[in-house]
Structures are given as C-alpha cells and as structure tokens.
C-alpha cells in the first residue's frame, strides 16, 4: 500500500495541481479513465497520446517526420530502462497531462519540461550511439561528439521530429487521426460491391 | 464529452459539404490551404531531366512509340501527365478519345472517366457501378466535369482518407486481402493506388457482357510476371499490332506496383511522403496538395529524411533514371525492328504456324518494355527491378529476332530489313498509315460543337446543388 | 583523425616491428586484438545465399563458366575467394598456377603474387619494381610466404594506412590524380582498391618488354565502358577463345570501381565501414580485422546506420542479388550458345571477314557478363549499374547471335546448333578438351616436391630477420 501510494505520488513540482485535484479525484477517476482512454495510455501506440487534441500538433508532425517508421512517442519521451521505470513515467505523465487537460489550462505553446529533456536526450543516444560515435560519421559534422555531449541533440536537429512550429493552432484538422470513424471503404460503395461479380471471378 | 468533440473538430466547421460533393471549390472554402495548394497543380512550368509538369509530346520525343503502338490509340497521341487539375481537359483534348458527335459515339467507353474526376464516385453512388461503366465515353460527357479532387480521396465528414475506386477494393478482395485493414500510413499510398496502377477493361464478366469493367490484374500477385500470367490465363489481348499482327498487351502507369518493389516502398515511405509532404505556411502546418515531381520540392520531401545537398539528391535520381533510360531506349529500337521484320515475313507469305512463337515473343517483349516505359516514376521508385525487367525484355525480343532472321532467310529474304524512316512523329505516323488530319479535324469539331454543350449542361446541373 | 591516430601510436612501443616486416605475428605482438581478429579470416564456416567464406567450386556450380573461359586458365579451376589468411595457400593450390618444377617454370608470371602477401612490398623495396615483376611465378616461391597482412596496409611506425601497391599509385598518376591527397575516409577504401580492382598485365612498356607489369586500365575512367575502350585502344587480348577464336577480355574483381557507382560509395560509406566495422571487446574499441561478408556481422556493420531488423537487411541484400543473378545466369547461357555457334561457323568454313564482327561481339558481350560475374559483391554494391551492364551484355550477345544465325544459314546449316551437354564441371571440361588428370597430377607433384623446398628456404631466411 505504501508502495502504491508512492507510485501515484507526483514529484514535487506537481504537488500544487495534485492537491487541488485530490478532492475531485474520486469522482473524476472513473470518468477520466474512460474518457481519456487511460487504458490505452499504457500502450506504445502513438494514437494513445493523440487522444488529446493538444497532442495533435506533435502527432501530426511526428507522423510526417523522418522518425515515423522508427520511433513512437514513448520511444523518445519515456525512459527505456526497466519495466518499472517505464510505467512509472507513464503513470506520472498520464496523471499530470489529464489533470491539466481537464482543467483547460494547457498553454498555447506546450514546452517540454527541462527534466524531461534528459529522458529524450538519452533516447536519442540510445538509438544513435553508434552513428554519433563512429569514426566515419564523425566527419559529417565538426566536433559532433563534443557538441552532442554538451547540447541537446534537437538544438541542432531542430526538425526532429516535431519541426520548429509547435503552437497548438499550427495544425487545424483532426480528422486525420485514426479512430472510430475509419471508413476506408465507404458504405455507399460497399452496397454495390457486395453483389459485384468482379469481386470473385477466380 | 463535449470537450472531446471540441478536441476533434475544434477548428473545422464542416457543415456545408454535401456527401460526395465533386466541386473542389466547395471543399476549398473549409480548407483553403489544401485547396490553394491543390490548385497549384495547374502550374506547368517545372521540368526535370525525364519528367515534366507540362504536356511533353512523347510521340515527338520518341517516334519509336508510334510504331510500337501501331493499330492502337496511343499511336495517335501520348503526352506526359500533367497536374491533377488538368485531368478533364487532357481527356477532352487527347486524340485517343476521338471526336464523338453524340452520346453513343466515339472509340472509348465510359470507363475512361474513372480516374479523372470526383464526379465518378458521385455517379457511382447515384446510378450504380454497372450503369456507370456502361456505354460510350461520350454518354457521361455532361456528368463528369470536375478534375480529380477532394472527393476522390476524402470523406467529407471526417476528412479521413477513403477509397472510392471500386476496382481497387475488388482487386484486394480477389487476392483475399481486406483493404479496410489498411493502416493510416498505407492509406497514404493506397489513395494513389486508386489510379496509378496497371489496369484493363474486362468485358466478359458473366451477366455484364459488353461493359468495360475496370479491373486490376492482380489476382496472382502484382509483379510484372504475375500480371503477364494473369493476362495470358484470361487470354486478354489489348489490340492486335497492325504491322506484326501480334496480340499485344498495353501496360499503363503501374506506379504503385513498382513503388512497392523499391527500397522506399519496403521501408514504409508512402507516396504522400514524397509527393504531398508536410508544409509550413504562416505558422500553419498542412499537407501540400500540390502533387508534383518531388524534384521541385526537395526541401520538404527528400530532405525530411536525407540530409544531402539538393543537387546531390537530384543527381542520385538522374543517375538511376539515366541507367534505366539507356536500356529502355535500346529495347525500343529492337522492338521496332522486330515488328517490321515480322511484317516482312507476313509479306513474304509466312504461315500462322511459322509466326506463332514470334508473335508471342513480341507480346512478351513489348509488355516488359511498356511496363518500364509507362511508369514515369519507376526508374526512381524501383530502379533495380526496372533493370531486371528490361534485361528480360531485351533477351526475349532478341531471341524473337533470331527466329525472325531464320524465318526471313527461309522465306528467301536476303540482308537486313531496313529500319523504317521514323525520325519524327509525323514520319512515324505516316509509316504506320495514320491519317492524322482526319483525327485532328474530328477532334476540333467535337471541341467546337459537342463539348460546349456538355459544359453548359453541367453548369445548369451544378447550379441546382 | 589521421593525426589522432598518429598521436595515439606515438606513445605505443613499436620498436620491434622492422620496416615492411611481412610477418603478421610480429605486428600481432603489439596489436593482439587486431591480429586475433585478422586471424579469424581463417574461419570458413559462413555462407550466405550467393557468397561464402569457404572454397565454393564455381565451375561445379556454374559449368557454363568452363565453356566461357575455354582456352584460358580459369576454365581449369575457379573458386570463391576465402579470407585473407588463405591467400598464399589458395595460390599454391589453384590449378591456374600449374605445377612448376623449378624457378623458370609454369604458366604464370611473378606478378601473380602481387595481391597475396606483405612480402611483395618488402621485395619491391629490396629489388625494385621491375625486378619483382620479372620472371616466372615460380621464381619467387621461396620469397612470398606470408598471407595478406599488416604491411600491405599499414606503416609500421605510425600505423597509418598506406598504399603499398605500385599499380594503384601509377593508375592515379596516369589519371592526373594525386593519391597522397586522399582523405582518411577515402583511405579506408583505397587500401582495398590496392587489390579489389580490375587489372591486366601490360607487357609492351618500352624498355620493359616481356615483364608482366601490373596495370589498372583506368586511364580514361573506370566504368565498364571506359575500361573496355582502354583495352580496345591498346589492342589488349587476354586470350583467344578456343572454340570461337574470339579475342577475349577477362574481368577480375572490379569491386572498387563498382562500389563507387553505388549509393553507399556515393555517400562516402567506405569498404571498412561494412567489412571492418568497429568492435568492442573487454571495453576496448578497435577495428575488426576479420574481413568477411557483412551479412555475418549485421549488428556491427549495417546496423550502425540502419535500424531495421537483421532479417530485413539480409532480405534487402538478397533481393538485389536475386534480381541481378537471374539475368546474369541468362546471359551465361546465351554466351555458351554464341561460342558454340561461332565454332560451328568455323567448322563450316566461315572466313575471317565473315567472322570479324561476330568475334568482336563475343568479346564485348562476355566482357559485360564477366564484369558482373567477377565482382562477388557487385550485385549489392551497385545493383542498378549491374542491371544496366547486364542489359547491354544481353543485347550485344543476342545481336551477335542474330549475325550467327544468318551466317550459319548462309553456310548451309539447318536448325539450331545444339546446346552442349555441360551439366557438370567434368562434362564441360571434357567438352572443351581439357585433360584434368594431367593438370591435377602436375599440381600434386609440385606440392610434394617443389613447395616443401620453398617453405624450408623461407623458414631459414625468416629466421635471420
Ligand atoms: Ca493495361
Ligand atoms: Ca582483367
């Protein structure tokens, strides 16, 4: 029980919003779990993060980035150490994000918190260690190794993966995120195809 | 829940788009950035080494094409594709669609409209698939007027990507695949696969005889060999070559099939990644609907993934294209030779039995050539496969010419059959016996008489939406 | 980085390596990790779909090769290359070097040792280039005994990469390029280009007549066409084909030339990046000197740059190789046919004039085939270029067979010239008239009598270092 409590306790900086929310917690939890698809939050599916519209700019920019086929949100934003570490971070984020979201207090321009930087930085390094340290690759950029240990990678690689323009209103249309409205084959067309001969002429 | 709905549609008032509305301008009111960029496909100024946004007259550039397609519509007129907004105009203007004078007239079926307009899904929804395919091209002249657009690829409610092409869904079904299981990223290529694929008109579907039913020949797979086997099985013949009498196949833009065999396709890079990259304008991000050669937009397309110089990336593309073009042009000439040699054999009294293998060789050799020639992006999308296909095409064609050489000597012919004088399109068309002035005349008449009527009728009809 | 390396080794005690010391074990005392990994090239267990670390008998696998090389050493014996440590043994054992009985004996010149041993730079330093190339292969049997090693690529003082192959330096000079200006990264490929390149023996250098001077035919460039033009210009003929009498060219491992035309070469990925990746052992990072197929080491080579699964990367390689192999094997068969058809023409009394173009066609067609076949990595290093070269090769060879078909009929021959019965290496060698048992016998004799003497002499000599 003590451990569970500790598990749910957010770090210091979050104490204020956490306390304010405590009262509403009980009633809101159930609602919140269902509404925000909190269950899916525990998966690595980027759609889980994009359940919130405020994550849409990040989702769409990631979706159009060089990393789409290689790294999902959690690959970068969640520590990839032990299982415990991983889910601890998810639970904390989930708690924090849904709190802010429901309070309608999200800022126009979301910014990554400094203490999350290190998580992301470590993840860049996790995948790119070889490239960043390989002798051959060193010739790509002067003092790459030195720079990469003194700066955040994305200070140079500014387009990775969200690009430079990150405001909430930079991306307008949300129909693009897959969900319940998937209609790959529209109904009006299906009705003709069901009795189509050409469907099964083998 | 309100908060969630707001989340989904926060900035998108979608109330005024009707189901399957074919008018791009109407969608454009809601989505000005996408519409404006779409409309930039009107721009015809860009040209790269091998492709162009303008109408390059391929028959002028490669007069051999005229001979290879002797007896078929493509020998009359064939140009490089332009941007999507030109689709209807180009279909009106091509000599291939002839000069219909009424609604039951002209060389082409209704089916030709299929990949040119969002009026097609609208019509299919209204009158059904069979009725849509039925009849002459001219029968739907006043119905199909809006160039390729939003309703071809989007659901008007959710703006999600959607497949409106029956032939694509059916092709998946016949392969036992379920297109509704496609991922979002696959959809970013499948919307293109609605049109940028090899096709034929199947006219022997039981109960639908005489209807030119649009069909993708993928039942046994979609490699060059798979499709050839399919056509051989169903004994499909697109046309009989007027010089050699060979039972020919025509390949048309197998872009999607070829793309899948290249490294980008294998790595999950979608058509939209290169041809519709994400773009930032005035602090807004959106999908660039100016579908065009990515070489006119390296920064937003290639350089998302590749950090090389623009010039180096362009050179990579040209290097691949050069290597493929060299052998393709070689094969063109061999095929011209083979057709005229076959004609010479007939002229000298060859029998069907003597010609049988030769004609099949011409069919298979030219199919390989056309598979490469008709996919304008293929030499970049999957260069290794294009090289393989050309190697096979050269081999089959030359093996056929060995048979021809022997048969010619058996028939008493001495020396080489001279290469025809086809330095220009006009010379080549004369050589195959095309009366171009008659074709041009009937087209002019159509444009002066029938076409304005179609447009007027359409205007009246659309005013009532 | 070059500087750094020098700096790094300035403090390492390197005093016990003599200038150009050919004994890898001696260097190994200073660099145990590099030496041990180098020594793993002895391992012959790995095989991929098309390549192998063991001695695959290509003549058995592709009996067509025997016919293509009729009249030339390669038809006696040709195997896949093995690791570097086997270089001397394989040279002793191959039937191509025959069975010399003394120092002035056997079919091969001294020059054959050149790419097999660090004793070569030592000898050149001692006696000069001309004296080294002079004489029979057997004249240096007791001198060249250490397999390819450290002194071929490294300076013993600084451990810097260095070029010890005169032919490479001279080839650069003749092209007006200065190899000493090469970057560190280029050196990581140029050390390989000392040996993994197309070459020939030039025997008409004024003042050096009769010396088989190792020469890279790159004066006009190093594409397939450039080198062919070079050979045509200097009228070089490697051998006259014993069936067709064509004046043939032999291509040997143009690995470096081909690699440069592929995307990895263009992007500056070096041979060492894939074949000698970094490795960590006991916390120490070093260059893996187990030069081998990268497919046996995906994690350290490919995956440094590509994050795909091992299996997917291997499949990418096989996909490219499959597509090239298909047309290569096709072309092999066409060339066999062409050679036997040409022989038939001679048998039927064809004249030199009638055969002239045909023989040139055989030369050029087979050069293209061999350019692809002899580079065992080429189908991955530059698959698009390989596809192009094969397409050309098929075209030229078939065009030649058209000429042959006509000539055969003119000479009164009816029907096809039958494809020879060459299902096995033995059958093929019998077909071209090789007396294999005599060759094997003389080799056995050499190994029993002369070879032990060479080894004993070398041992005595090296004991005195
Ligand atoms: Ca077709
Ligand atoms: Ca050679």
Image (tube, coloured by chain):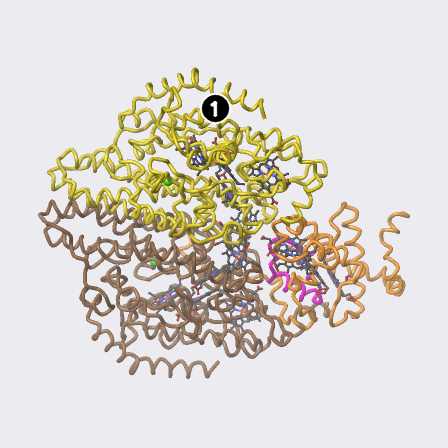
Chain colours: A orange, B brown, C yellow
Q: Is residue C425 above or below residue B320?
A: above
| Most foreground residue, B418 or C356 | C356
Name the residue: 63% across, 58% down.
A141
- Is A60 colored magenta in this rendering? yes
Q: Is residue C148 above or below residue B352?
A: above
Q: Is residue B355 above or below residue B18?
A: above
- Is B340 colored magenta in this rendering? no
| Most foreground residue, B128 or C82 | C82
Name the residue: 42% across, 83% down.
B459
Q: Quadrant of the C terminus of chain C?
A: top right
- Look at the image and give the residue range highlighted in magenta: A50-73
Q: Position of residue C382 (x, y in %)?
A: 45, 48
Pointer 1: what residue? C142
Among the 4 quarters of the image, the one containing residue B203? bottom left
Name the residue: 61% across, 33% down.
C18
In this view of the protein, can residue B108 be seen by the observer?
yes
Chain ID of residue with mark 1: C
């Amino acid at each position: 029980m003590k451990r569970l409590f500790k598990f749910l306790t957010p770090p210091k900086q979050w104490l204020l919003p956490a306390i304010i929310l405590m009262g509403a917690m009980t009633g809101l939890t159930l609602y919140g779990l269902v509404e925000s698809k909190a269950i899916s939050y525990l998966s690595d599916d980027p759609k889980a993060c994009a359940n919130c519209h405020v994550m849409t700019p990040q989702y769409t920019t990631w979706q159009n980035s060089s990393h789409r086929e290689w790294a999902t949100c959690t690959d970068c934003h969640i520590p990839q150490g032990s299982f415990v570490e991983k889910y601890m971070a998810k639970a904390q984020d989930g708690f924090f994000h849904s709190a802010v979201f429901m309070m309608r207090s999200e800022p126009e321009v979301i910014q990554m918190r400094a203490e999350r930087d290190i998580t992301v930085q470590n993840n860049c390094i996790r995948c790119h260690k070889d490239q960043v340290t390989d002798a051959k690759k060193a010739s790509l950029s002067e003092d790459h190794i030195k720079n990469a240990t003194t700066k955040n990678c994305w200070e140079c690689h500014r387009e990775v993966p969200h690009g430079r323009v990150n405001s909430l209103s930079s991306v307008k249309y949300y129909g693009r995120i897959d969900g319940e409205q998937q209609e790959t084959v529209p109904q009006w067309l299906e009705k003709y195809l069901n009795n189509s001969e050409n469907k099964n002429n083998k | 829940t309100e908060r969630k709905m707001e989340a989904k549609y926060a900035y998108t008032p979608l109330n005024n788009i009707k189901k399957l509305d074919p008018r791009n301008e109407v969608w454009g009111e809601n989505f000005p950035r996408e519409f404006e960029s779409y409309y930039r496909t009107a721009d015809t100024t860009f040209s790269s080494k091998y492709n162009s946004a303008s109408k390059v007259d391929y028959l002028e550039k490669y007069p051999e094409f005229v001979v290879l397609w002797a007896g078929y519509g493509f020998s009359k007129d064939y140009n490089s594709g332009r941007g999507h907004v030109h689709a209807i105009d180009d279909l009106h203007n091509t000599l291939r669609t002839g000069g219909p004078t009424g609604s039951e007239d002209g060389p082409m079926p209704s089916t030709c409209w299929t990949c040119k307009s969002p009026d097609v899904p609208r019509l299919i929804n209204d009158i059904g698939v069979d009725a849509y395919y039925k009849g002459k091209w001219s029968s739907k002249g006043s119905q199909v007027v809006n160039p390729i657009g939003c309703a071809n690829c989007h659901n008007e409610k959710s703006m999600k990507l959607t497949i409106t092409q029956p032939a694509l869904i059916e092709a998946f079904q016949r392969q036992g695949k379920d297109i509704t299981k496609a991922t979002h990223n696959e959809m970013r290529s499948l919307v293109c696969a609605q049109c940028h694929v090899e096709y034929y008109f199947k006219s022997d579907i039981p109960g639908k005889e005489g209807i030119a039913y649009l069909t993708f020949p993928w039942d046994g797979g979609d490699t060059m060999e798979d499709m050839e086997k399919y056509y051989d099985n169903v004994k499909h013949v697109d046309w009989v070559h007027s010089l050699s009498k060979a039972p020919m196949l025509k390949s048309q833009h197998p872009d999607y099939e070829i793309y899948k065999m290249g490294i980008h396709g294998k790595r999950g890079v979608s058509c939209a990644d290169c041809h519709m990259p994400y773009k930032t304008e005035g602090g807004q991000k959106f999908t660039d609907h100016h579908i065009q050669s990515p070489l006119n937009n390296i920064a937003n397309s290639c350089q998302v993934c590749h950090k090389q110089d623009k010039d180096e990336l362009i050179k990579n593309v040209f290097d691949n294209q050069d290597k493929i073009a060299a052998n393709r042009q070689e094969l063109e000439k061999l095929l011209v030779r083979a057709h005229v040699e076959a004609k010479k054999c007939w002229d000298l009294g060859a029998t069907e039995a003597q010609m049988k293998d030769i004609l099949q060789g011409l069919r298979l050799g030219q199919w390989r050539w056309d598979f490469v020639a008709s996919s304008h992006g293929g030499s970049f999308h999957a260069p290794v496969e294009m090289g393989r296909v050309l190697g096979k095409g050269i081999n089959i064609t030359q093996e056929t010419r060995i048979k021809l050489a022997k048969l010619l000597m058996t028939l008493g012919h001495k020396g080489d059959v001279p290469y025809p004088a086809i330095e220009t399109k006009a010379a080549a068309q004369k050589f195959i016996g095309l009366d171009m002035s008659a074709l041009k005349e009937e087209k002019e008449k159509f444009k002066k008489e029938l076409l304005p009527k179609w447009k007027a009728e359409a205007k009246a009809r659309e005013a009532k939406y």
